[in-house]
Image: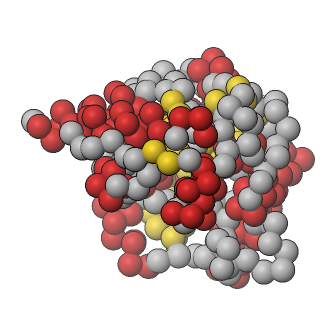
Amino acid sequence: MPSNQNPLGALPARFRRQRLLIIGCGDVGLRVARGLGKGGPRVLALTSTPARAPLLRAAGITPLVGNLDDAATLARLAGLATRVLHLAPPPGEREVGPRWWLDPRSQALARALRRRTLPQALVYASTTGVYGDCAGGWVAESRPVAPATPRAQRRVNAEAVMRHLRRAGVCVSVLRVPGIYAPDREGGTPEARLRRGTPVLAAPDDVYTNHIHADDLARACLAALWRGRPQRTYNVADDSQLKMGDYFDLAADLYGLPRPPRVPRSLAQEQLPLSLLSFMGESRRLVTTRMTRELRLCLRYPTVREGLAAERLIQRG
């Protein structure tokens, strides 16, 4: 029997080692695995694409082929991991059924995990979009959610599904994440948009936007997996406090490109796609006190200036 002091202490060594299961192991998941280093937990990842298996193995990750949209493929996840990092997004607009506000992927994962011994801890990466438009106000985690888009409503449902696991004793942490950027991430910088000359809102109509470097997000995920308080929500963002237009102006100056044109909201609604307009319809600034105090996370890139400038230094080197 395991000892009372260390529940894993009396088990064979191969069972004492922690096992981290990553659901949705894309760019951020790979950064998380790299951040563990040698001697850390065994890392496993669910992938719906068998062709990704060699990439995962090369990163020291054991691939498990399965699909959150096919519950029958998730049976092997039960009792497999001591900690779970859930990075998979809900279905998109074209994939949802009549109950469009639900996240069936998170529901399928929760059911699979419940079949056997549950993990000690689970971290779910949500979005700051669950707050809706806050008119540029400061937003702490205690603020009630007010999702304004179907995508954000599905995220609220996913958070609730994951938190429900607390009744079975799982320490669940929710990370609310804004825009993720990194020079080595696909579409991870504003350079392409600047080169296209895509306009931004004029100053009177502009909105606050929030950011986090992908490396810092990966470190936040790891911190929450081992330091997160039970049933706790954390805003994960840097200290930039920029409006969207100012962010693109900053990036343009760093890249040596023309600043984007500024247009009033009335013209933006005619010129820009709905997907982009949705981000221009919400304004908020995030309070990250919990992230720094409870997760004890010191950001490597405190603002987007440091993150984007680091990219330019690498390119020039």
The residue furthest right is 167
Question: Could you tell whether 58 is left or right of 275 in the image?
Answer: left
Pinpoint residue 222: horizontal percent, then vertical percent. 53, 38
Judging depth in this view, the residue of 233 and 66 nearest the camera is: 233
Pinpoint residue 119: horizontal percent, then vertical percent. 70, 50
Question: Could you tell whether 107 is left or right of 47 in the image?
Answer: right
Pinpoint residue 86: horizontal percent, then vertical percent. 62, 54
Question: Which image quarter is the C terminus in?
Answer: top left
Question: Which image quarter is the N terminus in?
Answer: top right
Q: Residue at x 81, y 67 (%)?
A: 102
Judging depth in this view, the residue of 99 and 104 nearest the camera is: 99
**Depicted 30 relative to depicted 315: above or below:** below
Q: Residue at x 66, y 25 (%)?
A: 287
Q: Residue at x 61, y 40 (%)?
A: 205
Q: Residue at x 57, y 64 (%)?
A: 270
Q: Quadrant of residue 177?
A: top right
